[in-house]
Every structure is written in structure tokens, then in C-alpha cells.
Amino acid sequence: MRYFRKIFFWVFLTLSNAFLLWSSVFLFNSAMEGLAIALIAALFIVDYAFLNPKGYPYRYTLPALILLFILTVFPIYFTIKVAFTNYGTGHLLTREQVVESLLKEYITNENSSDTVTKAAEPYSYRIFMRSENFLPTTDFLLILENTGIVYVAEKPNILERDQNGLPLSATSRMSELKGDQAIIGENAYSVIRSTQDANKIIAINQISSARTTQYAFFFSFEDASTAPNQKYAISEIFLNYLEKADFTNLQGETLRFGSRYGFRKLMQAEKKYRLDTITFDQGGKVFQRTVFINNRTQRPLEERDGFFYETDDQGSQSIVGGYSSFVEFQNFTKMFTDPRLSQPFLMIFSWTLIWAALSVLFTFTIGLGLALMLNNPGLKGKVIYRTLLIIPWAIPSFISVLVWRHGFFNETYGVLNKFLVTQLFGLEGIRWLNNDFWAKVSCLIVNTWLGFPYMMTVSLGALQSIPITYYEAACMDGAGPFRRFGKITMPLLMTSIAPLLVGSFAFNFNNFVGIYLLTNGGPEMPNSITNAGSTDILISYTYKLAFEGSRGQNFGYAAAITLFIFLLVTGISAVNFKISGTFEEVNR
Amino acid sequence: MVGSKHHYFTHLGLILILMVVLFPLFWVFTTSIRRDNAAFSTELVSTRFTFQHYKELIFKPKNIPTLIADMKKAVNISEEYKGKSEAQIQGSLTDLIAKFEKILASTDEYLNNTDQDIQKMNSFYDVQQKLVLDQFMRNYPAFLSQLQKFTQDTIDSMAEEVKILLDSSILEKIAETGILPDNQTLVELRFPELYSAFVDVTQKTQTLLNATQEELKILLAENSVTPAVRDQLNNSFFTLKGLIATGGFTYTKWLREISIKVYNPLNGVIQAIADEHLTTLWELYKENQKNSAREIEQFLKDFNTKVLQLSTIIKALKAEKIDNPLQNLNALNQAQEARTVLLNQNAAQKLKNSVEINTIENRISFFQQQIDVQIAFQVQAEGIIRTFFEKPSFISTDAIVLEKWNSILVQTNALLATLQTLENSPNFPDNLNLNSLNKSLRFIVDNKEKIVSYLGYVALSDSISVYANTYLQLVPLFGDVEGSLSERTKKLAQLDSLNAEYEKIEKERITENERLSVISIEAVKLQNNIVEAKRNYDLLLLKNQLSTVTNWELVSAFVTSYTAYQDAYPAEKANFPSFIAIFEPVSYLNRLKELTEDFANQKNVINLLTKTLREKEQEFEQRSSLYISLRMKGSQIKVQELTEIEDGYLKAYENFSFSLNRAGRRATDLAKIPFFVTVKNDLKNIDKQIYDLVQLWNKKPDQFFMQWLLNSVIVAVLTAFFTVVVCALGAYPFSRMRFPGRKYGLLFLVLLQMFPSIMAMVALYSLLRFTGKIFPMIGLDTIGGVIFIYLGGLPFNMWLLKGYFDTIPDSMEESAMIDGATRFQTFIKIVLPLAVPILAVVFILCFMGTFNEFVLARIMLQNPKNYTFAVGLQSFANGPFQMEWGLFTAAALIGAIPMVIVFLFMQKYLVSGLTSGAVKG
């Protein structure tokens, strides 16, 4: 039994080490360094916990620690990293990826209209299909034709696929048809022509030593009689094989689909950019640098601010690719200095503070009032009242907020406008969610409704803990009800409630659901280059920056604001811990 | 004791607060069980209850459109049928067809059931119709007499204009359609003479008809008349009768329609019989008719002449009393408007003028400035010259100097002369002052001898040139000034005339305005009279209509007109209040009739529809196996029968759903009226049946609420379970053991908990995309992935557990360890059982937190079938079904109620747990 345990122990340790090591190497290779580092840290802790007797307590915390490293620490590391980059719309890829994709860009010859050469002529093509049991397969050949010369091309060989399995690049070999025969690599092909029309090829035979396979004419855009096959040709052949394919002949020329003819014809193509070194003078010293050169214009691409720029004949520049790059403290400085960003940011920040403060004030006042009413010893049915009053808290908040938003605040159909404002008071309907002021009022109404039961419950608990003898003594000394409230209730209440109020402030500071589901942060703030809204609080603003890219996603800036929020909340909580003395026990 | 014994006010206050606080819940509940769409209703709560929304959410019952879609999917072998055998697909298709048939059958059943109720309604209608008609017939004379009295009185006391207008409407109607039963009495009342002429014509026509009939009898009695001729003759008589009945019978018409078209062909036939007696009789028959027709024509002419005469008189009266005053008013108004235009033009002209004058005056004042500058120079020069006068004279011999002096003298004189003429001109303005210039120039002229004798001094001769300069500067300006001055004068004169004109028009306008206001009052009176005349005319028509009621149709037609009359003149309601009780049942019965007719029509439509659908469906059933085997072989197929079924359904549904829904609403509305108290339940039943029937046919939004709820429960339970296990393990050492990194570990936990997770989502998203490649179970858009991500919420719960573990005394564990238990054993066997309450709290908190979580799930889940409840509800509420409040509120309640119950039961533990964590879940 003992041996068994020991063996189990070592096998487990080895396996987990191997797994973590393999994972982190794998992650490094997949360019997720952050997670890899987190796993290596986990690896060390695992070994420490099992090999060092002092690390025994860590055996208990291991699962929690690993989860924390993967799901909490790694995202935090990621956020901090992103906060110093310009990661976002236009800067999503790494520089290597952009370079790679630029080198893969092709340009077809269709636009060089100045000279009509063989190279500028499109290639028409026809698909020849091998059938099985009279049904088409995905085994096919192509006949290409250009200025009277006919070529045979093989099914493209897919080199790379994207995550949905669609090809990213593919290549096909082609060869000129000479005397109805063509040889591509090890395969020989002969064509069969129509007896009525000698120009029309109706089938191709693939001749190998073992057997002969026949490919029958299946589809061509120019032949209307093949139209019924078009659907199959497009869904099975074009999208899966031809769309991204290059056709290369023995002379090294490349054919591709261009924008002029779409899928209908192939064009001769060449690479759009090449890498080259240019030399330039700077202060008398000669430097050499590798740059992209546009093969058409022979002009180099300019690289600055995480973008590659191309210069056209008029000298104006356009972006051809962007990558994420390190921008130091720009995201933080522009939060306060760039007026287009800082103005909305400061407005949102101040509203966040007001919102959190007013939410706490309203919920606490109402909650305390109700608690005082319910704290009456002689009151009957206390439990029922309390249970009913607590219901808004018990309902999942996303449900309540959606009900408020759609049923109550809708301008035309909502209960408030339809029955209360217009019918009862005879006023014009209020633009609840589309007016700066009323949208804020709506948010506060809903949040107060959601939050007062919590305040009521905690106040009630605190009130009940105040010994009744204090009041009796005060009564004897002739203190009135207000005096009793001010001198006994409030001070005693505050000692236990104050940390909760600060906590509630911190919670509302980041109360995403209360804002986002109700107003979506709207109505939109004018003159802002980000999608800031008048009721947005920092957290919803960050969310919109990162995920709702109607004006472009901006992860870098969002991460910077996240760090700012983190700092503020930590500050608030530090104050709170000071008040409540949470950490005193830690040092026990 | 503190506080009073009774707490009425506290109770009252609490109940009021409760009503406000729980109102949203009340609204959600009532909206979820409404039959109509709350978004478009004007009622806060409806009495038409249904549990249809809940049924739909929980069972997703199949109905016609969903079945059609399902059948299409099955026959086209869509995603969910991939990989099944032909027999399996055939089986499920047969099931679907059976369900389809079942729904058609239950449609029939609903229709029949409703029809039974409708039959009850019809018999109720029949019974009530008689009663109501009786009651109406008993009571209407009283109403009629009141109306009679009322109208007679009013006609007598009417203003003259009203009478004229009334008469003119009557005459217009006569000219348009002749005298018809509905305006007969009116004519009799207002134009007895005309009426008697009309009666004459009618009598004459009647006589003609009677005489012809007699003669025809004689004619037919002849033996020689063959049956064919007899028929033709009879027919000809009916043609004549018909012609008369359409009204406007004249000789010309008789000639054209009867004599030529009917009798001429008969002539040949009768002559062919060759019976002389018959021919004579026939000729006489025709002759008599001809004469009568001529006579009638004469009478008619008289009648028409009378109408014309009367019309002319009334028209003249109308023109004098009504049209002319109104036209006058119009003309006055137009003139007044023209005046206003003129005044505006005048004002604009004046403005232009004064601007021009202002420009000129500016020019003049500029001139004055120039003069002042020159004077300043001159004064200076004069001072210099005067200083020489004390010195000995020094005559100049320089010819140039002398010549200059002479020219200056000439120029100065000329200048003075110009000044003189300028000052004498009538245009000379007050604000131009030439005196100083005059005076300073005079110095040269007055002292010319003296100056000559000093010209030898160079300084003096230089000073003199100032005067030459003056000349140079001012002379060109003088021309301009003269022009400006005359122009100014002209403009001023223009301004005066404009002012005069303005005053004139203004005066006219004011006097006219007074007149206009007088006339306007008249006109308003006139307008009122016109309205009054129209009302009286309507009332007279109404009275006429009432006096001719004999049967139900006429009664209901009358009630319709009466309602229209009341709607048009709301003030009239007060005049006949006591009769509403008699009239209302009629309109109730009419509404009931509309309901039953609506239903009967739609029943036919639906019967026809179900019949065709059944046929198509049977055809489809027969061929379905063929379709499936074809599709299995890879052919693309288009199922004609299903397309036809869908088209037929869509076309018919549009119509009948609207009419049936209307009928249902009507039924409920009627059920609220006391008149229908005996059939109240049947009416309600009709509404209910119709609602259920329409549910079988209407298109429903595609929703997966139950799937979402299930997803949420799975996610929440698993997350909560794993969290409890991991946190209990993780928190234990922090409470019981001292080890390196403990203090910083705790701090670290607190810090982690505070980091906002928004940006973390980007990282977690890429993490899930990555893990999904290796373990598809925990990838993007999977429930597993979401659970994995949710396990990140550990720190807070670890804190909670650690706090609770701290309160469990160590002594028990210590004694267990002395007995040989390991650490782990004490943890499992002692600590965990003691910590069950807090474990439950953590479980529930985590369960609720996960159930409520929406942000992460929204990012990670894309396929609607994988949504959690929060994401699903949000997408449903914001999506294309924003107005489906019934489904939305029902779903909200289904999602909320279990949570509320759990929360209320666990309240005590939760509150303690939450308050110690200091944050709301």
C-alpha cells in the first residue's frame, strides 16, 4: 500500500510536470508567452508543493492556484501588457504577421490597360470532373485558354487552411496542350474532342501506367448548357479549391482570380511587393535598411506609428497594413491630454463618481428608512413586509433591468409614458433613454429599486444589534426621538455599516449591468471619436471601447482605463479595509 | 416603552411603499398572462387571460407554420436529419404529417365549437331582435313627435339665412335625384306647391300604368294572340313598368326605349297575325300610351319649370344673403392684405431711402472735416502772415512769387464766390458750416494790398501757398457736394411723399379694419348659420328616415345615421338623452351581427383552406418517400406540394387572422355590456376559442428559452460545484497552517478580486479559442468553455470560506490528529461537515452569480442554442421581437421565480455571507 502510494505520487508528479512543460512549450510556439509563463510558474509551485515538506500546504491550494494563474493572473498580465501597446482595430496583427501577409499579396495584370499584351489577356477556363456513380466528385481538372493556346491544369494542392478549413493558399501545376497531349510531372493527359466540333474538348483522359481515368466536361461560365452545375461548382470547387489558388506554368508565370472578372476568368498575376534594401544618408553616415518595394510603382513602403503606408502617384499615402506595437505611456497620457479623448473621459469619470455616490445615498436613505419602520418591536407582520420588500434584490438583476428598460422606459409603449406621464399628468412623454438628463435619472431609479433591499437588510441587522437599554436610558434622560436617532442609532449604526457603504460605492463604481443593459451607455455623446455615451460609467465605456467597434475597437486604450479603474478601486478598498480592520486577522 | 401600540400609519406607509416597489412585478405577471399584446394596448391590465405564453415557452407546441418548416427541413434533409437512414426520415416525416393533420382536425373542432356558440348568438340575436324591434316600434313615435316638434319649432324660429340654405340644399337634392321617398316630406314641408306638382306627375304616371294594364288585358283577351306574342306583350308591359319605376319617365324616353325598341318589332309580328281587330286594338294601345306620355311630359315640364323658378329665387336669395356677404368679406380681406403688402413695400422703400440719405450726409460731413483741416492750416498760415505785418515791408520782385500770389488771389475769389452760391442754394443743409472758411479766406482778400508789400519774405510767400493748397483740395469736392446736396434734397422730398402715402394707406387700413371686424362678426354668424342649416337638414332627413321605419333593416339603418348625426354634432346628445336606451340595443345587436358575419365569412375561408391543405398534404404524403429517396441520392429537389401549402397558408392567414382577432376582441367587448348578461359566458368562450384557433396558425418567433434556462442551470450548478470544491481545498491551509507566502497570498487574493475583468475578456477569448483547438469541450461557443472561464471567480469565495474556517475551533482537529488522523482526514471528516452551512452559502452565491452573469457569456457564446438565459433574454428583448411582451415577461418570470424562491429561503445565510464580503452578489 505504501509503495503503491509512493509510485502513484511519483507517476502523478512526473505526468503533471510533463504536461505543464509540454503545454508551456506549446504555448510559446503559439505565441502566447503570457500563458506559458503562468504555466511555468505553476510548474514550479507544483514541484515545490510535492518535493519540499514545507510546501505541504500548497498541495491543498494547487487547483485554486492553477486556475487563478490561468484565469486571473494571465488576463491581468495581458491587460497590463496591452495597456502599453496600440492593440486595436487596424493594429490587431503582429508585425511578423503583417510582413508575411504583405509578401503573399498578389496583383493581377488586369489594370495595366496601357499595353494589350498576352500577359494582360484573361484566361478562360473549363472544369472537367471525374464522376462516381454518375455523381460529381471533387476530383477535377481544368482546361485554360488564352489567345488560342490551350493548357491543362491539375486540381490545386492546398498548402494552408484557415480555422474553418477553407484554403488560404493553394497551388496548381499547368502545362500547354500540344497535339492533344500534355504532360504535367509524372501524369500524362490526352484530350477527347467532340466529333461535331473539333474545337470543343469534351473529356480528358489521365493516363497512368495502372489505369486511365476519364474527366468529363462539367462546368464553364461561358457554356450556358452547364448552368445547372453552377451551384455545385461554386460551393464545392471554387470555395474549396480555386478561390485562393495560384496556377503556375513552366515559365514560372502565375495565374490568379482578379477583381475584374471575379470567378469567371483567370489573370496573370505577380507579387505586389518585394523586399529590398535601400541605402540612405543620415548626417553623413550611410545606412542600409530592408524595406518593401511595390513591384508596380517601384516605390518603397513607409513604416511609422505601427502602419505600413503606400505612396501613390499624387504623393498621397494610404495604409496597407497595421500591426500592434509598443507605445509606452501614450494610452495614459492621452487619457488626460488629447482633448478628443480626455473630454469624454473626464465627463464619464465624473458621472461614474456621481452615479456611485448617488446610488449609495438613495439606496441607503430608503433602506434605512424602511429598516427603522420595520424595527418597531410592536409591528405585526414584520416578516411578510421584509420578505416582500426584499424581492427586488432576489430577482436576477439582468431580468429586472430588461423589464424596466422595455416595459417601463420605452418612449412610446412604456408603462411610465403611456399611463403615468401622458394619461395621469397630461404631460408630453419623457424621452427617458434618449435624453442626457432623463437617461441618468432612469439609471438611478432602477439602481435604487434594485439596491435598497440590501441596505434595508443590513441596516435592520445593525439596528437589531443595538441594545434596547441604551434607548431606555436615553428616554429616562428625556431625549426625544430625533435626539435618540442622532446620538445613539446613527453612531452605532455607522460603525458596522460604514464599510458596507464604501463597499457598495465600489460595487456601483463598476456596476456594469445597471448601466449597460438599461441604456447601453447612451444617448451618445457628441464630438467624441470613441463611442462614449452620457450615461456610460468607466467600466461600460471600457467594454464598449474593447468590444463594440462601431468606431473601431481600441484595446490598448481600454486596457489603460482598466488599470486606472483598478487603481481607484484598490484605493477605495484600502480605505474600507482600514475602517473594517479586515487585515488585522491576517497577521494573527 | 418606545413607540406606540398601534401602527396604523406605519402599516399604511409600508403598504403604499410595497405597492410602488412591487408594481413592476405585478406588471410583469399581468402582462405575461394577457391575450392581447400589451405593448400596443391602451389598458394597463386586460381581462383576457391566457397561459399561452407559458405553454409556448415550455412546450414549444407545433403549429401550422412550424410544421410546414419542419416538413421542409425533413424532406430536404437539413442539418438535424443528416446521417439518418431513409426509413428514419420517412418515419419522422410521417409523424409530422400526422401532427399536421391533427392540427387541421382540431382547427375544424374549434371552428365547430365556436360555430355552436355563434349559433347560440344567432338565436339570441333573433329573439332579441324581435324584442328590440318591438320596443323600438313602441317607443319611436314618442321620439318622432319630439323630433317633429323640435324641427317644426326650429324651422319657424330659424334665422332667414338658415331657411334659405336649407331650401337650397333641398332644391339641390331635387335637381340632382328628383323627389325620392327620403326627401318627400321635406319637400312637402318647404315647397307645398312643388309637392303638389310632383303628386300630379306621380298620379298621372300611375293612371297611365293602370290604363295600360287594363288595355293590355283586353288586348291579350283576343283569340288570335299567340302565346309567343302574349309573352312579348307581357314583357313589353314589364319594360314599361320598369322604366317608370326608375323615375324620370318622359315622352322622349318612352319613344326611345318603348316605342322604337319594343313596339316596332312587335308591329311586324302583330300584322303578321293579320287580325284586323287586333291591329286596331294594338294601334289604340300605342296611341293611348303616346298621349299619356305626352301629357306626363307636359306635367313634368311644369314641375321642372317650378323647380327652376324656385331655384332661381332661392339662388338669388342665397347670393344676396349669404354668398355676397361672404364674397364681400373675402374681397375686403384681400384688399386689406394688398394694403399690408403696400405698406411693407413702402416701409422697405423708406428704409432704402433713409440709408441713401445717410450715405449722403456722411459724405457731407466728410466734406466738413476736409474744410476743417484746411481751416486749421489757414489759421496757422494767417498767424504767420500777421507776424510780418509789424515788420518793414519787403516787396518781392520775383516774378514767380508774384504770379503765384495773383493766382492765389484769383482762386480765393473764385472759391468765395462758389461758397456764396452754395450758401444761397436752397439745398444747403444746416449741418454744413462754411462761415469759418469764408472768414479765413476773407483774410487774404481783405488784406491783399498789405500782403503784396511783404511778399519779399520767403516765409510769408510759403505760407500763402497753404491757400493754393486749399483750393486744390476743396474745388473737386465742391462739385461732389453740390451733386450730393441736390440728391439729398430729392431724397428728402421722396421720403416725405412716401411718408404721406404710408399714412394714407395706414389710415385706410385702420378704417377698413374696423369695418372688417364688424363684417367678420356677421360672417361668423353666417358661418354658424350655415352649420346650423346643415344640421337642420340632417335632422330633417333623420326625421324622415325615422317616420318611414317599418322593419329591422330600416331601424338599424336609422340608428346608424343617428349615431353618425350624434358624432357630427356632439352638442345634440343632450337634446335626446332618454332615447339612447332604445337606440343602443340596436347598435349592440348590429355589432353582434357583424361579429357573427365576420366569423361566418372566415369560417368559410378556413374551411376552404383546410380542405386544400388536406388535399395537398395527402398528395405530399403519397410522394414523400419518392422525394426522400431522390434527395438521398443527392438531387436538389423543390417540393411543389409544400410550396403550395405554404403559399395557401400565407395568403389565407393574413386575412382571417385579422378578422378573427377582431371578432374575438368584439366578443369580449360585448360580454362587458349588461345587455348581453345572459350570454356573457358564451361570448367569452367565443373569444377564447378564436384565440386558441389563431394560435394554431400564427407565426411564432423562434426562441429557445427552455434550452437557455437548461444551459444556465447546467453552467451554474457545475460552476458552483467546482468552485466549492476548489475553494474549500484552497482556503483550508490559509486558515489552519502557517507557511511561506501565506500573508502575501491573502493580500494577493484581495487584489485579484478587485481587478476589473473587462479587458480580461480579450485574453480569455483567445485562451478559449486556443483550448478549443485541443479540447473541443472547453472551446469558444461551448457551455464547457463558459464554465471553465467562470472558475476564475475564486478569490472572493476563498475569503468567505477562510473566514468561516477560522471560527471552527482547532481543538477537535487536534484531538483527531492525536488519535492518528492525517491532516487531510481531519479536513474531510471534521472541518468540512462543520462548514456545511458556509459551503451551501458559497454554492448558492456562486450559483446565483453565475446565473446572473451576462457579460462574459455574451462574448464567448455565439450560437443562439448555446446561450445562457441572461444572454438569451437580452438578445430576445433587444432583437426583432422587442414588442413580444407576452413571451418576454413570461420568460422573465420563469427565470426569476426559482431564483427568488431560493433567495428567500436562504436569505438568512446569504445576508450574513454577503455582508461579511461587503459586496453585493
Image (cartoon, coloured by chain):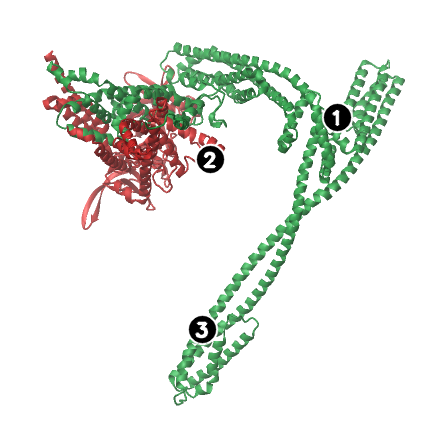
Chain containing mark 2: A
Using the image, tell me which numbered label, if any, was put on residue B372. Answer: 3
Q: Residue A520 carries which label?
A: none
Q: Which amino acid does label 2 sit on?
A: Gly
Asked if badge 1 and badge 2 are on a common chain, one would say no
Of labels 3 and 2, the one closer to you: 2
Query: Between tags 1 and 2, which lies in front?
Result: 2
Question: In x, y percent, where is residue A123?
Answer: 36, 31
Q: Look at the image and tell me in which quarter the N terminus of chain B lies.
A: top left
Q: Distance between the residues labelled 3 and 2?
A: 70 Å
- Circle 2 sits on which residue? A429
Q: Which of marks 3 and 1 is in front?
A: 3
Subunit ID for the residue under disc 1: B
Q: Where does label 1 land, which residue?
A: B246
Q: How many tags in the picture?
A: 3
Could you say whether the residue bearing mark 1 is in a helix, strand or loop?
A: loop
Using a 10 Å C-alpha cutoff, classify the residue at mark 1 as few (fewer than 14 neighbours), some (14 to 19) or many (20 or more): few
For the colour red, the matching chain is A
Binning the other alpha carbons within 10 Å of mark 2 as few (below 14), some (14 to 19) or many (20 upward) gives some
What color is chain B drawn in? green
**Discs 3 and 1 share one subunit:** yes
Q: Do labels 3 and 2 share a chain?
A: no
Image coordinates of residue A531 in percent, x first then y, are 35, 37
Instruction: Compare marks 3 and 1 and give the one earlier in the sequence.
Output: 1
Residue type at the position of mark 1: Thr
